[in-house]
Image (cartoon, rainbow, N blue to C red):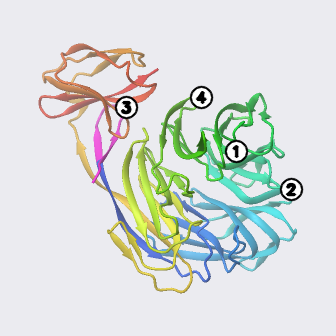
Amino acid sequence: MKTLITIILFLAFSVFSSQSQDFQFLWANSYDVSNCNEVGAIAVDSNQNIIISGVHEGPVFIPYKGDIYIIKTDPDGDTIWSSKMNGELILGDMIAMGNNIIIVGQGYGTFSYKGIEYGGASYFLFALMLDAEGELVWYFDDESKYGTYANLSAGENDNFLLHARTQSNLGDWIMIIDLDGNILNEKLLSPNHTLINHVVYYNEKVYMNGQLSGFSGVFIDTVYIPQSPLESTAFVLALDESLTGEWVSIDTTLTNGDGRIVANENGLFAYQETLTPPFNLVKNLKKFDFDGELLKEIVVPSFNPNALILPEIAISDNRIGLFCKNSSNSDNFKLLIFDDELELIEEKVVIGPSDQYSNQMANQGQHFIISHIYTGDLNMNDEITLPYGGSGKVPYIAKIEGSTVTYTTQNFEKFEKLMIYPNPAIDKIHIKTNYEFEVTGISVMNFSGRILLESDVIPADSNFDVSQLAPGVYVLKCNLANGSELIKKLIIR
């Protein structure tokens, strides 16, 4: 079993803890939903409760259109409540903001929720918020926008991002909305040239993963996205706080319809399917800094280099998860877990008859939640068997948890301070210590615990070469002869 070390720094330097995590399926539950077409979205609220939603009682054609079910469970997967939106509806996306639930999608005519009718137009984007008990807080719709491929992303400032396409399903709208349902800012990104597939709203900026549509490039303010001469252009695009184009990173693609993007303090992480000559489809996971510099790029392992793996993505503080198709049919799915340096640290498989368009993923604290629909017994990495006892497609939720062991060093107040200067640094740092215990080793790690630089016994007053490190934030650790450690945050410019 591979091991992940999670490092938590208390900048007051009172206590240092490290957590080792071995991932395993903790539980899996199924839910009784009649004629279930999909799990179209998953969210985890501030109390770690889980919400899944999707279309049921609809025809088999994609995108699925019918009634929308909503199921809320406690953190252990036991149902708290369930509800339905009745009508001709397509689910676009769903997020949790605190204990509230926000749902967007596409409507056709009147639909009802808890006996009250909404909508009415023949063709409209809808958005609504439910409280913790599933009661409707607010609702709005917009006949000029298309909600089938809408995306939501929660911000840190009690606002959220709603992305929708124009009514023709070409071009994109970006909207910043508060928790009362008021649109604070909106921007027509392009009326017909862009196809945004996934968005993230982080530090009040908008980051998007998409592709170009048409035969020419397009300007987003002063940012230019060119048309690829080979096929189409895949891009990651950033907008600043005022929704003005800030930077773009481009690649060549056949289709980037499964493009995904997430963010945390360590950077932006984007999945793209790119094209290399002569005609090779490559599944890339990329890491960017917030200025658009590509820091690292890897090829995601897949069962077939030219197959669509239909990934869903989630991120915790220091891990990125992909839940994706792992066979030519729909009887094998895989969960891939990477650290924030894109090192693959865990693989889990889910084997049994399921569905290729319905896999969803979210994080629950440091752990991951997956959801899907299935039609037969599921073997979850030989750790859990989820029996099938229904008729037709049935939704399930499973939790992948890391067992945690915590180690705590002695209080920093028992030692003189560990000094590093300059910090931030460029190529060398000066390390100064002055205490009774000998330093027996030094190492520099990333925030997932992977050692990047290390050395044996270090004098108490020494220089250390860090020129091999890329710009970023690291952890410097001094091992002491008494078995304890001194920890310092290290910034490389």
Residue drawn at x 47%, y 20% is 493
Crowding at label 4, few (<14), some or many (≥20) Cα neighbours within 10 Å?
A: few
Residue drawn at x 71%, y 37% is 228
Which residue is the site of mark 1? 211
Q: Which residues are magenta?
A: 1-19
Left or right for 368, reference 409: right
Left or right for 406, reference 309: left
User: In which quarter of the view is residue 488 placed?
Assistant: top left
User: In which quarter of the view is residue 423 placed?
Assistant: top left
Crowding at label 1, few (<14), some or many (≥20) Cα neighbours within 10 Å?
A: many
**Disc number for residue 144:** 2
Q: CA distance from mark 3 to mark 2?
A: 49 Å
In terms of sequence position, does the residue under pointer 1 or pointer 3 come before the other? Answer: 3
Residue drawn at x 49%, y 58% is 323
Closer mark to the observer between disc 1 and disc 3: 1
Which residue is the site of mark 3? 11
Which residue is the site of mark 4? 291
Residue 249: image location, x then y, percent: 63, 33
- Vertically, is 266 above or below 55? above
Position of the N terminus by quadrant: bottom left
Taking depth in this image into account, of 476 and 255 the one nearest to the observer is 255
Amino acid type assigned to the residue bearing label 2 in the image: Ser
Q: CA distance from mark 1 to mark 3?
A: 41 Å
In terms of sequence position, does the residue under pointer 3 or pointer 2 come before the other? Answer: 3
Closer mark to the observer between disc 3 and disc 2: 2
Q: CA distance from mark 3 to mark 4?
A: 26 Å
Tell me if residue 433 can be seen: yes
